[in-house]
Image: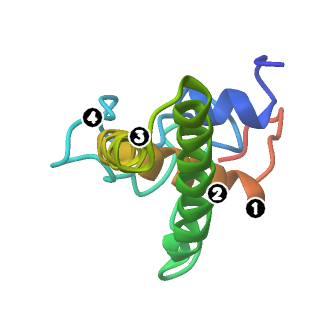
Amino acid sequence: MLKKGSKLYSVLHNKCPRCQEGDFFQSSASLTFKNNLKIHEKCSSCGLKYMIEPSFFYGAMYVSYALTVAMAVAVFVICYLIGLELIPAFIAIVIILVVSNPFVMRISRLLYINMFVHFQKKKIK
């Protein structure tokens, strides 16, 4: 499931979706706000241009929205099951979403580009 060639490998290891060797983001740390979303212009291994078209990653906002809604629902269900009332549950949701925001932004970009670019075994340069 997490072998080279799968979409999950590319997303979880911050790799190019086509060759899965070159790094996608310039920084490997996902919790820094300064360089969180800076991506390389193209892959160092296969030469894939990451910004496929101008404003390509605007579509990643929809992926980010879906991820945050899913996380908020999951946190609410967990809070409900452990017996928290409504206000503490919403406070927990806000805290979880604020803390996970840098991670969600990076994952949404990787998920979005992996929807359009597929793995190729041969090196293209």
- Side (left or right) of 92 relative to 9: left
- Side (left or right) of 17 relative to 57: right
Compare residues 109 and 123 and report the one nearer the observer.
109
- Which residue is rendered at x = 35% and y = 42% of the image? 88
Height in image: 2 above or below 101?
above
What secondary structure is found at the residue carrying circle 3?
A: helix
Q: Which residue is mark 3?
A: 103
Q: Which residue is mark 2?
A: 113
In this orientation, does residue 48 appear? no
The reply to whether discs 2 and 3 touch (Cβ–Cβ < 8 Å) is no
Marks 1 and 2, how far apart at CA: 5 Å
What secondary structure is found at the residue carrying circle 4?
A: loop
The reply to whether discs 1 and 2 touch (Cβ–Cβ < 8 Å) is yes
Residue 31's disc is 4
Marks 2 and 3, how far apart at CA: 16 Å
Marks 1 and 3, how far apart at CA: 21 Å
Residue type, mark 1 in image: Phe
- Label 1 or label 3, whichever lies nearer to me, is 3
Q: Residue furthest bottom?
A: 54
- Label 2 or label 3, whichever lies nearer to me, is 3
**Residue 3, percent across and down?**
78, 17
- Side (left or right) of 68 relative to 88: right
Residue type, mark 2 in image: Ile
